Amino acid sequence: MSKKGPDIDKIELIRKVLKKNPKGLWIREISRRTGLDRSTVSIYLAKHMQGEIEDTYPDVKGDMIKVVRLKRR
């Protein structure tokens, strides 16, 4: 039988990494620091953490890179 609902431990792990990096990180870096697959990080951010994160697109040497950070309170 498959597990229903999000894994709270994964959410806490992603949240912990983002708290340590208030300027934000790209998804690949969140994945590297948490040890979670990039697709897992993307799904959790989009489906289970959308109310507490924000996306930014800083212009770094002409590249448009999506950076994710916790919303500022």
Image: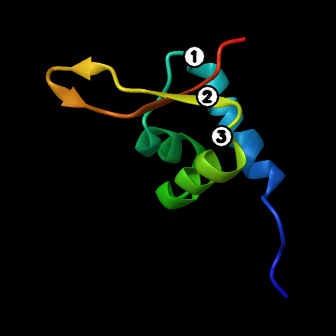
Q: Residue at x 56, y 20 (%)?
A: 21
Q: Amino acid at mark 2?
A: Leu
Position in image of residue 7 (x %, y %): 79, 58
Which structural element holds mark 3?
Answer: loop
Position in image of residue 70 (x %, y %): 63, 25
Q: Residue at x 72, y 50 (%)?
A: 10
Picture quarter with the C terminus: top right
Q: Residue furthest top?
A: 73
Q: Amino acid at mark 3?
A: Gln
Q: Residue at x 51, y 47 (%)?
A: 31
Report crowding for label 1: few under 14, some 14 to 19, many 20 or more residues within 10 A (C-alpha). Answer: few
Residue wearing tag 1: 22
Residue wearing tag 3: 50
Q: Amino acid at mark 1?
A: Pro
Position in image of residue 61 (x %, y %): 15, 20
Query: Which one is earlier in the sequence, the residue at label 3 or at label 2?
Result: 2
Picture quarter with the N terminus: bottom right
Q: How far apart are the two marked residues, 1 and 2, measured between alpha carbons?
A: 6 Å
Q: Are marks 3 and 2 in contact (CB under 8 Å)?
A: no
Q: How far apart are the two marked residues, 1 and 3, measured between alpha carbons?
A: 16 Å
Q: Nearer the viewer, mark 3 or mark 2?
A: 3
Q: Which labelled disc corresponds to residue 18?
A: 2
67 or 35: nearer the viewer: 67
